[in-house]
């Protein structure tokens, strides 16, 4: 069981935002948290991913029966946030290659390149491999392409668990 509390001011009492939440997700399963805007989905996700800003998360998060501490979370999990934040001047392939160099440092250059090629193909990004990511000032990828790029960067890590906040819009 877990809870997330928030104290908006120094004099205010703690307010429970999420309480009595418990879930089990087995390997290969997808667990979706659905609800209307403002229902607390992102707040719960922030507590689960240890990004509970402005509050205190209490409870236990376990992976395969072992408590998931910050070190194991970084090693075995990834978070894909609502906003796609990438370097606007990098090309799509370069973005995935940098992620591969970071997450797959133990592999040879040839093995990493094969992983990148495979990911680009699986994510349907071969056609936009040389397109700059772009931003509001620089023409680049479409919104859907940026979303797939965010997923590719997360998947190249080969995580045990992925947390997706608004995976599609």
Image: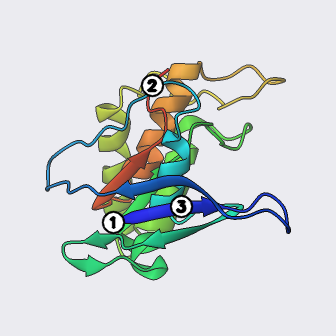
Which is more toward the observer, 58 or 120? 58
Q: Is residue 129 visible?
A: no
Residue 31 spot, x, y in % from top left: 26, 43
Name the residue: 85% across, 68% down.
10
- The label number, if any, that marks residue 54 in the structure image: none
Which is more toward the observer, 7 or 107? 7
- The label number, if any, that marks residue 4 in the structure image: 3
Discs 2/1, front: 1
Image quarter for residue 118? top left
Discs 3/2, front: 3
Q: SS class of the residue under badge 3?
A: strand
Q: SS class of the residue under badge 1?
A: loop
Give yes or no for contact between labels 1 and 3 (Cβ–Cβ under 8 Å).
Answer: no
Left or right: 134 as drawn, with respect to 101: right
Name the residue: 34% across, 42% down.
119
Query: Of callouts 2 and 1, which one flags the residue occurring earlier in the amino acid sequence?
Result: 1
Left or right: 162 as drawn, with respect to 133: left
Give the residue at mark 1: 1
Name the residue: 61% across, 37% down.
84
Give yes or no for contact between labels 2 and 1 (Cβ–Cβ under 8 Å).
Answer: no
Give the residue at mark 2: 168
Q: SS class of the residue under badge 2?
A: loop
Left or right: 8 as drawn, with respect to 3: right
């Amino acid at each position: 069981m877990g809870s997330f509390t928030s104290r908006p001011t120094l004099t205010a009492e703690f307010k429970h935002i999420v309480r009595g939440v418990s879930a089990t997700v087995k390997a290969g399963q997808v667990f979706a948290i659905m609800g209307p805007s403002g229902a607390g989905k992102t707040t719960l996700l922030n507590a689960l991913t240890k990004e509970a800003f402005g509050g205190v998360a209490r409870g236990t998060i376990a992976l395969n029966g072992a408590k998931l501490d910050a070190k194991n979370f970084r090693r075995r999990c990834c978070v894909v946030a609502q906003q796609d934040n990438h370097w606007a001047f990098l090309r799509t392939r370069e973005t995935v290659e940098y992620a591969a160099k970071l997450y797959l440092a133990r592999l040879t250059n040839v093995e990493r390149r094969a992983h990148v090629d495979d990911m680009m193909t699986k994510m349907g990004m071969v056609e936009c491999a040389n397109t700059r990511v772009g931003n509001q000032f620089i023409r680049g990828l479409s919104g859907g392409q940026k979303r797939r790029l965010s997923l590719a960067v997360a998947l190249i890590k080969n995580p045990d668990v992925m947390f997706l906040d608004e995976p599609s819009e």
